[in-house]
Amino acid sequence: MGTTTPSVPVIYQARKMATLDDAMRHYGITLTTNTRENVYHGHCPLPTHRRPGGQSFRIKANPLTGKMIGWECLSVSCANARRSKGNDVVAFVAAMEGCDLDRAAYLIIGGLLAKK
Ligand SMILES: [Zn+2]
């Protein structure tokens, strides 16, 4: 992978191949649903999260389909410790694996989150 490889198509391709639902299943993350607010929440699973406890991790769901559409951790220190910003599945894998978005995209394309 040379530095001339355009990364946006790779990230775009990875986004089409996997969802946040796939990522939650792959990493064994259990979240509580609040259907009235269309949000899932629970303990933050990210390695950048230093403060145990709390329900700072949230994923918004599409109110019509229930599919997960974007994640966030409300802890400022957790957010600041992450190298890549974003709230999609590629950014989540990058945060979990401690890598950049390109590497996360290649992991997803390589089948990291594929159903077994
Ligand atoms: Zn966190």
Image (tube, rainbow, N blue to C red):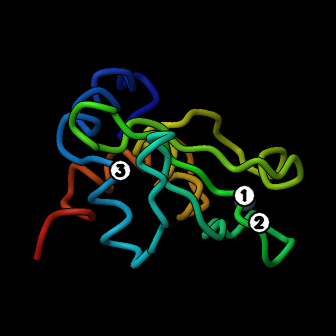
115 horizontally vs 20: left or right: left
Q: Which residue shows up at 16% across the image and 63% down it? A: 114
Task: Name the amino acid type tagged 2.
Answer: His
92 horizontally vs 15: left or right: right
Q: Is residue 31 above or below residue 34?
A: below
* Percent position of residue 7, x then y: 39, 26
Label placed on residue 56: 1
Dot 2, how many residues are within 10 Å of its Cα: few (below 14), some (14-19), or many (20+)?
many
* Percent position of residue 83, x then y: 71, 45
The C terminus: image quadrant: bottom left
Ligand 1 shows up in the quarter that is bottom right
The answer to whether the residue bearing label 2 lies less than 8 angstroms from the nearest atom of ligand 1 is: yes
**Marks 2 and 1, how far apart in space?**
10 Å
Where residue 25 sits, quadrant-wise, is bottom left
Q: Which residue is disc 3 drawn over? A: 20
Q: Nearer the viewer, mark 2 or mark 1?
A: 1
**Marks 3 and 1, how far apart in space?**
17 Å
